[in-house]
Image: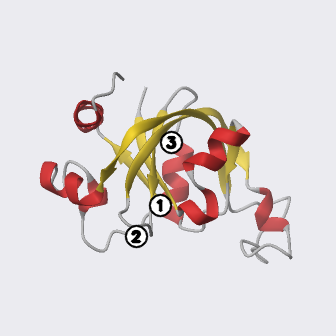
Amino acid sequence: MAHWLMKSEPEVYGIAHLEAEGTTLWDGIRNYQARNFMRAMKVGDRAFFYHSNATPPGIVGLMEVVETGLIDPSQFDPGSKYFDPKASAEAPRWDCVRLRYGRTFGRLLSLEELRDQFDAETLPVVRRGNRLSILPVEEASALRIYALLGEIP
C-alpha cells in the first residue's frame, strides 16, 4: 500500500464534502505529472487529504483509493472549466480515481508544522512554490505524519 497527498481547496471540495458523499471522483486534474501520479495509484492505497489555499493549509484527513484507471468525464463537458477540446472519447487525455472517505483527523497538521518536521526531499509538499495537487508520500514520511497526528495507520 502506497501513500499519497492530494490537495483541494476546502471551499471547492473539502474533507467535509467527501465525508458527506462517502466517495468521489478526483477529477479535473490538468497537470501531466499529477495525472501520472494518479495513474500509478493502486486500489487500497491511502491518500492524505490536504486543504490548500486555506488558513492555515495542511493535512486534515485520510482517503482510500477504491477505483483506478477511470476516464475523467469533465474533459468532454464543454460547460466544465476542465473541458479539454483536444480530448475525445477515442483518445481521452485525462484520468481520475475514485476515493472513499477514511476519516477526519482530530486536528489539522499545518504546512508550518510539516516544514518543521520534513525537508523537501522527504515530503515534497514542503518545497516552496510546489503547486502539484498530487504527490507521493514515502512510507517513512507517512508513518511520521500519523505519529505527529497521534493516529494509528
Residue indicated by mark 3: 40
Say which element carries label 1.
Answer: loop
Q: Decide: marks 1, 3 in contact (CB < 8 A)? A: no
Tell me the tag on residue 30: none
The span from disc 2 to disc 3 (Cα, nearest Å) is 19 Å
15 vs 29: above or below = above
Which image quarter: residue 66?
A: top right
Residue 120 in view: no
Number of residues whose C-alpha sits closer than 10 Å to that of mark 3, classed few (under 14), some (14–19) or many (20 or more): few
Residue indicated by mark 2: 131
Say which element carries label 3.
Answer: helix
In front: mark 2 or mark 3? 2
153 vs 63: above or below = above
Say which element carries label 2.
Answer: loop
Tell me the tag on residue 133: 1
What's the coloring here? secondary structure
- Residue 14 lies, in percent from the top left, at 57, 54
Number of residues whose C-alpha sits closer than 10 Å to that of mark 1, classed few (under 14), some (14–19) or many (20 or more): some
- Residue 108 lies, in percent from the top left, at 36, 48
Which image quarter: residue 146?
A: top left
Q: Amino acid at mark 2?
A: Arg
Q: Decide: marks 1, 2 in contact (CB < 8 A)? A: yes
10 vs 67: above or below = below
Q: Amino acid at mark 3?
A: Ala
* In the displayed structure image, the side of residue 25 where residue 41 appears, left or right: left
In front: mark 1 or mark 3? 1
User: Which residue is at the far top?
Assistant: 152
User: Which residue is at the far front?
Assistant: 106
Number of residues whose C-alpha sits closer than 10 Å to that of mark 2, classed few (under 14), some (14–19) or many (20 or more): few
The residue lying at 44 percent from left, 52 percent from top is 50
- Residue 70 lies, in percent from the top left, at 72, 45
* In the displayed structure image, the side of residue 42 where residue 106 appears, left or right: left
